[in-house]
């Protein structure tokens, strides 16, 4: 895993989101819902994904 930097849309915030595959780091619009999955990884628990987001130890997908 690498230390990720935000390279998606300007003024977007990464957050922990949930899908059927598990928890991931992505972007979210309150009106339209999830916008992108930024992390290559999925985590089994929300706490694991939050820790990855807080520490910056996750891998950003090249094409979210």
Image: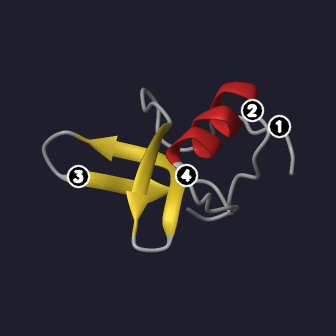
Contact (Cβ within 8 Å) of mark 1 with mark 3: no
Q: Residue at x 17, y 52 (%)?
A: 32
Q: Earlier in the sequence, mark 1 or mark 3?
A: 1
State left or right for residue 12 relative to residue 48. Answer: left
Contact (Cβ within 8 Å) of mark 2 with mark 1: yes
Contact (Cβ within 8 Å) of mark 4 with mark 3: no
Q: Nearer the viewer, mark 4 or mark 2?
A: 4
Q: Earlier in the sequence, mark 4 or mark 2?
A: 4
State left or right for residue 20 relative to residue 49. Answer: left
Looking at the image, is 41 positioned above or below residue 4? below
Query: Mark 4 — residue?
Result: 45
Query: Mark 1 — residue?
Result: 3
Q: Position of residue 43 (x, y in %)?
A: 62, 57
What's the CA distance linking mark 4 and mark 3? 20 Å
Q: Position of residue 41 (x, y in %)?
A: 68, 61
Query: Mark 3 — residue?
Result: 33
């Amino acid at each position: 895993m690498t230390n990720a930097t935000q390279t998606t849309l300007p003024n977007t915030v990464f957050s922990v989101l949930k899908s059927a595959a598990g928890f991931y780091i992505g972007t979210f619009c309150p009106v339209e819902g999830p916008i992108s999955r930024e992390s290559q990884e999925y985590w089994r628990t929300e706490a694991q994904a939050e820790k990855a987001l807080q520490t910056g130890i996750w891998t950003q997908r090249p094409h979210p």
